[in-house]
C-alpha cells in the first residue's frame, strides 16, 4: 500500500475545506455566562454544610432525649402529686362546709336526734300507698287506726287485714277482734260503697261487741275513699247488732288526737271518743290525760297554743312564748297531732308561728304544711 504523504500544503488545503466555525456572541455575553457558571458552582457546594449540621443536631437530640423525658416525667409526677394533695384538701374542706350547711338547715345545732324521731303520720303525697284499718288495744278500751303499707296498688281491705299476723302487729300492742277473721268486705269504687258480709260464726251477741264492731268499722271507713257501708249476712243478726241499721254513712267526727304509749314503748296517735264543735275546743282537750294509763296528753308541758286563726283552707296556729326544753319526740308528735286535728275540721294546710325552731323533725315550720293523709304508718320491711 502506498503511504499517504502529508505535507504542509496539503494540510492547508484540507483545512480550508472545513466549514467555518465562528462564535456569534459578543465579549460581554461570553463574560456574563462565565460569571453565572462560576456562581452556580459555588451555590451547589453550599448544601453540604447545612446537611451536616442537621445530622449533628439530630445526633445530639438522640443522646439527650432520655434524660429530658425522665426529667419531665419526674416533674409531671411531682405536679400531679401536689395537685392531688390540693384536691384532697379542698374535698375535705368542702365536706366540712357541706356538713355545717346540713346541720344548719336541719336544725341539728338544737338537737342532733330530731330527724331520727319516728313520724306518726302518712304524708299526703303517700296517701295511695297505705290503707288505714282500725284495731284495738289489749284491753279493747281504745281504738287505734293504723295505716299499713300496700304491697301492690290492687290490694283491698281484706288483703290488708290478713297482714296482721305477718307484720306481727300484736307485738306492737295492736289487737285484732275475732270478727275481722270471718267477715268479708267488697269494695265498689264507682259508687264509693263498701259491703261487709258477716259470718254466722261471729259471736257478736253482746252489746259491747256490737258497739266495738261499729266503732272499728266507722274508724276504718273514715280514712277510706268510701262514703257508706252496707252490712249484710244474717239480716236479723245484723239488725240486732246495729240497732236496726244495715247501712252506715261516713260522718266527719271532728275528733282531737291524743298519744297512746304501749308498755313496750310503741307510740300511736289516737282519736278522742268525743267530738268537738270548734278546732279551739279540740286543741284544749289535747292538754288533758284521761282514760287508760297508756293515754297521754299531746300538748307537752310548757308549751301552749295562744291563738288560732283561719284563712280559707289554712289554719294558723300561734304558740305562746316558751323557753322550756321539749323532747324532740314529744314536739314532733304534738305537731302531727295538731295537723290531724286540723284535717278533722276540713283544713288542708297548717302554719305554725312563734316556735323557737325553724325545723321540727323533717318539717320546715316556717312555711305552711299540708295536713297528713292518715295516722300511724306501718311499713313492710
Image (spheres, helix red, strand yellow):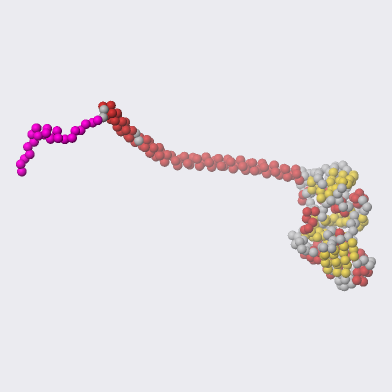
Q: Residue 333's spot in the image, x, y percent? A: 83, 51
Q: Residue 176's spot in the image, x, y percent? A: 84, 65
Residue shown at 65% from the left, 43% from the top: 92
Is residue 201 positioned above or below 229 on the image?
below
Is 5 on the left-hand or right-hand side of 203?
Answer: left
Is 55 on the left-hand or right-hand side of 101?
Answer: left
Is 252 on the left-hand or right-hand side of 81?
Answer: right
The outermost residue toward the left is 2
Residue shown at 83% from the left, 59% from the top: 225
Q: Residue 275's spot in the image, x, y percent? A: 92, 55
Q: Quadrant of the N terminus?
A: top left
Is residue 153 positioned above or below 94 on the image?
below
Dividing the picture into quadrants, the one containing residue 352 is top right
* Range of magenta residues: 1-24
Residue 15, magenta (yes or no): yes
Q: Quadrant of the C terminus?
A: bottom right
Is residue 120 positioned above or below 229 on the image?
above
The outermost residue toward the top is 28
From where the camera sits, is residue 327 visible?
no
Residue shown at 86% from the left, 71% from the top: 199
Residue 296, magenta (yes or no): no
For the residue pair 34 and 217, the one nearer the viewer reads as: 34
For the residue pair 51 and 11, the one nearer the viewer reads as: 11
For the residue pair 357 and 183, the one nearer the viewer reads as: 183
From where the camera sits, is residue 117 visible?
yes
Q: Residue 198's spot in the image, x, y percent? A: 87, 69
Residue shown at 63% from the left, 41% from the top: 89
Q: Count up the numbered dots.
A: 0
Dividing the picture into quadrants, the one containing residue 309 is top right
Amino acid at each position: 500500500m502506498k503511504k499517504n504523504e502529508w505535507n504542509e500544503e496539503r494540510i492547508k488545503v484540507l483545512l480550508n475545506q472545513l466549514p467555518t466555525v465562528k462564535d456569534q456572541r459578543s465579549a460581554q455575553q461570553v463574560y456574563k455566562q462565565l460569571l453565572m457558571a462560576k456562581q452556580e458552582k459555588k451555590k451547589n457546594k453550599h448544601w453540604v454544610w447545612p446537611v451536616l449540621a442537621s445530622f449533628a443536631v439530630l445526633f445530639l437530640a438522640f443522646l439527650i432525649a432520655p434524660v429530658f423525658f425522665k426529667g419531665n416525667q419526674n416533674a409531671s409526677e411531682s405536679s400531679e402529686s401536689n395537685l392531688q394533695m390540693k384536691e384532697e384538701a379542698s374535698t375535705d374542706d368542702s365536706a366540712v362546709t357541706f356538713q355545717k350547711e346540713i346541720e344548719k338547715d336541719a336544725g341539728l345545732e338544737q338537737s342532733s336526734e330530731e330527724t331520727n324521731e319516728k313520724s306518726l303520720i302518712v304524708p299526703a303525697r303517700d296517701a295511695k300507698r297505705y290503707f288505714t284499718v282500725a284495731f284495738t288495744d289489749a284491753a279493747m278500751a281504745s281504738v287505734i287506726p293504723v295505716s299499713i303499707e300496700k304491697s301492690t296498688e290492687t290490694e283491698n281491705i281484706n288483703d290488708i287485714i290478713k297482714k296482721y299476723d305477718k307484720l306481727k302487729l300484736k307485738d306492737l300492742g295492736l289487737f285484732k277482734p275475732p270478727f275481722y277473721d270471718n267477715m268479708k268486705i267488697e269494695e265498689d269504687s264507682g259508687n264509693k260503697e263498701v259491703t261487709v258480709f258477716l259470718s254466722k260464726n261471729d259471736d257478736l251477741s253482746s252489746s259491747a261487741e256490737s258497739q266495738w264492731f261499729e266503732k272499728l268499722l266507722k274508724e276504718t271507713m273514715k280514712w277510706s275513699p268510701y262514703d257508706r257501708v252496707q252490712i249484710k249476712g244474717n239480716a236479723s243478726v245484723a239488725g240486732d247488732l246495729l240497732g236496726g241499721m244495715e247501712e252506715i254513712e261516713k260522718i266527719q267526727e271532728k275528733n282531737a288526737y291524743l298519744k297512746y304509749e304501749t308498755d313496750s314503748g310503741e307510740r300511736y296517735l289516737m282519736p278522742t271518743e268525743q267530738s268537738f264543735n270548734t278546732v279551739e275546743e279540740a286543741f284544749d282537750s289535747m292538754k288533758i290525760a284521761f282514760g287508760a294509763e297508756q293515754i297521754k296528753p299531746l300538748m307537752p308541758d310548757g308549751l301552749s297554743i295562744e291563738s288560732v286563726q283561719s284563712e280559707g283552707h289554712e289554719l294558723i296556729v300561734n304558740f305562746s312564748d316558751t323557753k322550756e326544753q321539749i323532747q324532740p319526740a314529744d314536739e314532733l308528735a304534738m305537731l302531727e297531732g295538731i295537723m290531724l286535728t286540723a284535717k278533722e275540721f276540713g283544713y288542708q294546710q297548717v302554719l305554725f308561728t312563734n316556735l323557737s325552731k325553724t325545723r321540727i323533725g323533717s318539717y320546715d315550720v316556717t312555711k305552711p304544711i299540708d295536713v297528713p293523709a292518715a295516722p300511724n304508718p306501718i311499713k313492710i320491711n
